[in-house]
Every structure is written in C-alpha cells, then in structure tokens.
C-alpha cells in the first residue's frame, strides 16, 4: 500500500488497527499499566514510554505481514518483540540519557541539587497524591510525564535525527548516519504530508491527552502505527 499523503496515511493506519484490534487494545492497556511506574522513577518511566513507542512500530509490521496474503507472515507475536526490542531498548536509552542531561543542566542552574537523583527514584504513590484527585486528575498525574516524553521524542526525531530513522534501522538494517540521511531526504520530499502528520499528533497529545489523559497509552500506540505507515508508504517498493 504505497500512499504518500496525510489522509491516506490515516486510512492506512485505520486499516492496520482493524486487522488486529484486540492486539492493539491489549498492547495499549499493558503499556498504560507500565507507564504508571514513572511515578516511582521518572527515568524508568521515560524508558518504558520510549521502548513501548518503538516496539509498537515492530508490532505494526507484524500485523501487516499477518494480514497480507502476498507475504510470508511470521509465526507468532514473539517475532515482533524479538525483532524490535533490542533496537527499541537502545533508542529508549538514548532518549533517557538526553532527558537526564537536560534535567541535570536545569537542576544545576536552578540549584536544585537534591532533585538530580530523583530522576532515578522518587516514590510518589502516597495518599496525599492520590486521595484528593478525581479520575481525570489521577490519570493526568499518572501520565503527565508520558505526554511530555512523547513530545520530547518527536522533537528529538525531527531535529537531531529523522522521523524515519528508527524504522530504516529496524527494517532495512541501515546505520544511524545512513538512516538519518535517507530519512531527512524523504522528509524534505514529503514535507507537506509529514507536517500535517506531526500537527495531528501534537493535537492528539495536547487536546486528547489533556481532556482525556487516560487515552495517552492509546495515543502512544497510534503514534507507533503512524510512524510505521508513513515509513512504509514512502520507502516500500512500488
């Protein structure tokens, strides 16, 4: 399915979701549970969020292979995890390090030295943080950092790397530099569609996550799918 327009990418993403709705729902719910660990360790939370985002791209590939009659499909879901998890972990670690560096510089500048180690462990599941909140406030508190992490990774991908870097490395075994060069060239060529896609994602995070913060895990899953479909439509063989 070679489509290179924003509307077509959304249709493509909807088709992928329709091929395995229970799988996507289960993945989103599991990711949602794991994201709550960010209130024990921000570093761990960011790592889980980024790993979940990147692994979701591998799952999208698995779903498409299973749905396509013209391709040899992997035997089971473990294929997606085995293929995507190692690179996902490396990508997540790079994001955690980048986040920590920014936070460290801010803590040093503001003189909040005690807050430096709180990036690695800071237990926030105390009655004062939970009992006074309604359901929406509770989810906003749980996933507030995850919303920021998603914006952070998108900004990192579109400034220091490329929107297409991760799938190019994962599915075509490109090196970091080669993937960035190919991805940046594709970004320039398909700038209009990609800008619309990024605008759509920002709207999802700011409005969807802000009004209904319990949707954040589902937004992560959708972003994974959108990264995959935009990559696949641009780089697949005609």
Image: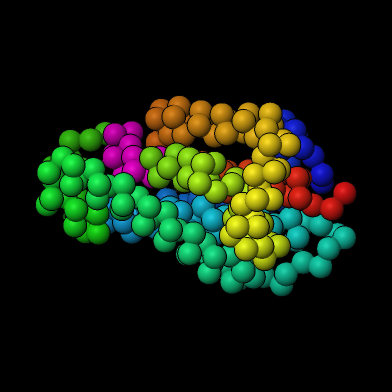
Residue situated in front as seen by the camera: 141 or 180 = 180
Residue located at (23% from left, 35% from top): 133
Residue located at (49% from left, 59% from top): 91
Decide if residue 31 is on the left or right side of residue 129. right
The picture places residue 11, in percent across and down from the top left corner, at 73, 36
Residue situated in front as seen by the camera: 182 or 135 = 182
Secondary structure mostly seen in magenta is helix
Residue situated in front as seen by the camera: 67 or 177 = 177
- The mark total stands at 0
The picture places residue 87, in percent across and down from the top left corner, at 54, 65
Residue situated in front as seen by the camera: 133 or 176 = 176
Q: Give the range drawn in magenta.
A: 135-147
Residue located at (54% from left, 41% from top): 158
Name the quadrant containing residue 55.
bottom right
Decide if residue 179 is on the left or right side of residue 35. right
The picture places residue 83, in percent across and down from the top left corner, at 62, 69
Q: Is residue 202 above or below residue 19?
A: above
Decide if residue 37 is on the left or right side of residue 111. right
Residue 140 belongs to the span the image colors magenta? yes
Question: Residue 58, can we see it?
Answer: no
């Amino acid at each position: 399915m070679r489509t290179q327009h924003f509307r077509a990418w959304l249709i493509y993403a909807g088709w992928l979701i329709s091929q395995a709705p229970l799988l996507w729902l289960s993945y989103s719910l599991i990711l949602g549970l794991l994201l709550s660990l960010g209130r024990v360790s921000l570093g761990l939370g960011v790592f889980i969020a980024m790993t979940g985002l990147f692994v979701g791209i591998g799952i999208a590939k698995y779903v498409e292979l299973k749905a396509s009659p013209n391709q040899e499909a992997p035997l089971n879901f473990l294929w997606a995890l085995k293929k995507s998890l190692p690179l996902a972990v490396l990508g997540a670690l790079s994001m955690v390090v980048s986040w920590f560096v920014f936070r460290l510089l801010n803590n040093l500048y503001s003189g909040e030295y005690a807050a430096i180690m709180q990036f690695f462990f800071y237990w926030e599941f105390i009655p004062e943080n939970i009992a006074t909140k309604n359901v929406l406030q509770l989810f906003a508190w749980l996933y507030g950092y995850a919303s920021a992490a998603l914006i952070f990774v998108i900004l990192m991908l579109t400034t220091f790397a490329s929107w297409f870097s991760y799938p190019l490395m994962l599915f075509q075994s490109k090196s970091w530099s080669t993937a960035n060069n190919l991805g940046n060239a594709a970004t320039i060529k398909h700038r209009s569609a990609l800008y619309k896609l990024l605008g759509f994602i920002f709207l999802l995070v700011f409005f969807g996550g802000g009004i209904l913060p319990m949707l954040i895990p589902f937004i992560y899953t959708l972003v994974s799918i959108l990264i995959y479909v935009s990559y696949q439509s641009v780089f697949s063989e005609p």
